[in-house]
Image: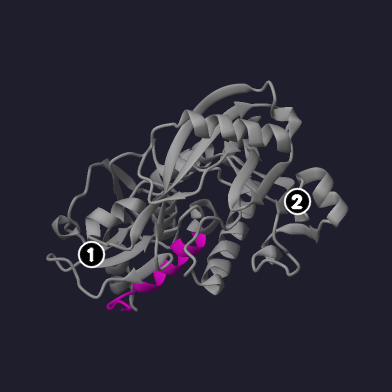
């Protein structure tokens, strides 16, 4: 590729549709790779599912048909990137910190989870430890990364702007109407309607945000497929959850859910009792029956743009985003596209 071809290549017009963490990291990856004309279009940049998420690095609420090899690859790349920016810019700036904690389960966990190599200090709990701490027969502890989505996503927006990326608040209803060279669809649950993809469905999650500087460790417990989690964010905020309700489209906070979450989390960690409640929120995790959709469309839009899809991350958007964004780059190459 000569100099003129290089200039033309990096001047190609790219539109990323979707303002959540997946869309932001995709745009940032493109800009860091040298592309100069990158725009993000989204209906909202401040009230997305990514903001509601518990935001712990840990594969969660993914399709049963997901490829564990791919999830492991994308997740590990994201862990490395989050660790890098945390160490380079600091927790106060990017909202990412190392946090130890434990998981408790009512089913055997005798083999290491496929993602265990990406976290630090992984070990199985003894039966006595699991029973005493979590009231379950099995469990393990490890140190992972906890994320404050508001801080991280604000930092990413600033990084995008510093590199010349642009933001446009708009509701995109038809990818055919976009005039550019490449479109990257990161619309999450919106892909169901935008693409008429019948495989897309929501997994409702109810959370409570509290203030408690004393809670330093995370907790996650699964009993009879009911998940309880306590996730301390940088700055003293703690997210309590939760629910995992497939095909529930309601974003209304359910008072019975709130009562149940407070009861379960207080039982798991007595320090929760008496904490100041900052708010409650229900969000819809974007899942598909087939797993994460990361592929180039077989058809270009009516203006000739190649469409690349990057959606369906379930409850793992904050675990997979950077790894998926890096793979988007494979289709945006000089002179041709991988289909």
Q: Is residue 269 above or below residue 247?
A: above
Q: Nearer the viewer, mark 2 or mark 1?
A: 2
Residue 8 or 330: which is nearer the viewer?
330
In the displayed structure image, the side of residue 198 where residue 88 appears, left or right: right
- Which residue lies at the image location 51% right of the left edge and 26% below the top edge? 279
In the picture of the structure, the residue carrying the numbered disc 2 is: 136
Where in the figure is residue 199, as x and y percent of width and height? Answer: 33, 63
Asked whether residue 332 is in view, the answer is no
In the displayed structure image, the side of residue 319 where residue 177 appears, left or right: left
Q: Secondary structure at mark 1?
A: loop
Q: Residue furthest front?
A: 224
Q: For the C terminus, which image quadrant?
A: bottom left
Q: Is residue 311 above or below residue 241?
A: below
Where in the figure is residue 33, as x and y percent of width and height? Answer: 43, 63
- Colour treatment of the image: one colour
Residue 131 or 37: which is nearer the viewer?
131
Where in the figure is residue 220, as x and y percent of width and height? Answer: 67, 47
Residue 126 or 9: which is nearer the viewer?
126
Q: Secondary structure at mark 2?
A: loop
Using the rendered view, name the quadrant where residue 208 is placed: top right
Say whether residue 127 is magenta.
Answer: no
What's the magenta region? 322-339
Residue 94 or 113: which is nearer the viewer?
113
Q: Earlier in the sequence, mark 2 or mark 1?
A: 2
Q: Which mark is residue 181?
A: 1
- Which residue lies at the image location 76% right of the left edge and 55% below the top edge? 139
């Amino acid at each position: 590729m000569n100099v003129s071809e290089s200039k033309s290549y990096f001047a190609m017009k790219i539109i990323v549709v979707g303002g959540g963490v997946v869309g932001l990291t995709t745009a940032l990856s493109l800009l860091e790779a040298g592309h100069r004309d990158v725009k993000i279009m989204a209906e909202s940049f401040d009230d997305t599912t990514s903001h509601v998420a518990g935001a712990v690095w840990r594969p969660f609420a993914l399709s049963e048909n997901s490829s564990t090899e791919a999830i492991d690859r994308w997740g590990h790349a994201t862990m490395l990137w989050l660790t890098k920016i945390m160490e380079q810019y600091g927790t106060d700036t990017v909202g990412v910190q190392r946090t130890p904690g434990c998981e408790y389960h009512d089913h055997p966990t005798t083999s290491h989870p496929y993602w265990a190599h990406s976290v630090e200090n992984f070990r199985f709990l003894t039966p006595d430890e699991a029973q005493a701490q979590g009231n379950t027969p099995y469990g393990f502890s490890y140190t992972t990364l906890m994320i404050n989505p508001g801080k991280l996503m604000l930092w990413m927006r600033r990084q995008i702007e510093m590199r010349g990326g642009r933001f446009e608040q708009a509701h995109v209803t038809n990818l055919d109407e976009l005039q550019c060279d490449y479109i990257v669809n990161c619309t999450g649950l919106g892909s169901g309607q935008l693409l008429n993809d019948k495989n897309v469905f929501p997994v409702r999650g109810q959370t409570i945000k509290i203030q408690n500087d004393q809670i330093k460790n995370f907790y996650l417990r699964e009993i009879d497929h009911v998940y309880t989690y306590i996730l301390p964010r940088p700055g003293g905020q703690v997210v309590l959850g939760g629910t995992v309700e497939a095909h529930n489209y309601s974003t209304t906070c359910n008072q019975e859910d709130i009562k149940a979450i407070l009861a379960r989390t207080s039982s798991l960690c007595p320090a929760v009792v008496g904490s100041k409640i900052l708010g409650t929120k229900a969000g819809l995790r974007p899942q598909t029956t087939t797993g994460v959709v990361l592929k180039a469309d077989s058809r270009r839009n009516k203006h000739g743009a190649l469409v690349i899809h990057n959606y369906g991350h379930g409850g793992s958007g904050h675990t997979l985003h950077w790894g998926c964004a890096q793979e988007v780059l494979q289709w945006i190459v000089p002179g041709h596209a991988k289909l």
